[in-house]
Image (cartoon, grey):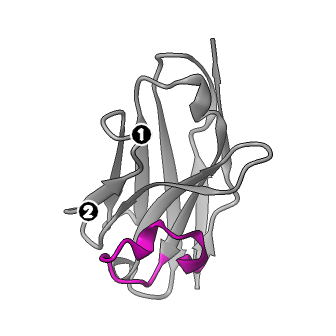
């Protein structure tokens, strides 16, 4: 079992920055999980944003956030972060962190259905 709790969301102007954090608690080995960030805008499906492998050495991003967002993880603190820069109106959504046991290849970490655990989400609103 893994419990995930996100924080750091809020209201920011277009072009601004926010850093989301996700704290994990688990009785399992934290490094056995790929960690990802997803988002869900009103009326839309949950979509992949970013993911990182067991030690944070490899990360992947959706095309819409590549170059603006950065995912990182701290295994000692059992945390995963999402630094979001140059935010756009279309980044407005509820952001969720997730944990999955799938291996970090073949893009399986991009699929919502492959994630076993989710946080409750944190709202990010970008205004003009």
How many discs mark residues in the rendered view?
2
Q: From this view, report whether residue 11 is shown above or below residue 50.
A: above
Residue 91: give x, y in percent of width and height. 57, 34
Residue drawn at (58%, 86%), measured in percent from left and top?
Answer: 1
Q: Earlier in the sequence, mark 1 or mark 2?
A: 2
Q: Compared to 89, does 106 lie above or below?
A: below
Residue of label 2? 56
Which quadrant of the view contains residue 8? top right
The residue mark sitting in front, 1 or 2, is: 1
Q: Tag 2: Cα neighbours inside 10 Å, few (<14), some, or many (≥20)?
A: some
Q: Classify mark 2: helix, strand or loop.
A: loop
What's drawn in magenta, residue-wise?
Answer: 100-116
Residue 65 image label: 1
Question: On the image, which quarter does residue 31 sit in?
Answer: bottom left
Q: Position of residue 43 (x, y in %)?
A: 80, 46
Residue farthest right in this picture: 43
Q: Are marks 1 and 2 in contact (CB under 8 Å)?
A: no
- Left or right? Give the position of 42 relative to 78: right
Residue at 54 percent of width and 67 percent of height: 98
Confirm whether the magenta stretch covers residue 110: yes
Residue 75 x, y percent position in the rendering? 32, 67
Q: Residue furthest left?
A: 57
Quarter of the figure with residue 53? bottom left
In the structure shown, which secondary structural element does the residue marked by tag 1 occupy? loop
Q: Which mark is residue 25?
A: none
- Quadrant containing the C terminus is top right
């Amino acid at each position: 079992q893994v419990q995930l709790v996100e924080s750091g969301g809020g209201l920011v102007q277009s072009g601004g920055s926010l850093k989301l954090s996700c704290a994990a608690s688990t009785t399992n080995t934290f490094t056995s999980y790929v960690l990802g960030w997803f988002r869900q805008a009103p009326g839309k499906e949950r979509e992949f944003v970013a993911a990182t492998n067991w030690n944070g050495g490899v990360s992947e991003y959706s095309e819409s956030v590549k170059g603006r967002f950065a995912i990182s993880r701290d295994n000692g603190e059992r945390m995963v972060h999402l630094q979001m820069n140059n935010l756009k109106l279309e980044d407005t959504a509820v952001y969720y962190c997730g944990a999955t046991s799938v291996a970090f290849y073949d893009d399986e970490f991009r699929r919502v259905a492959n994630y076993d655990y989710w946080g409750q989400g944190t709202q990010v609103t970008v205004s003009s």
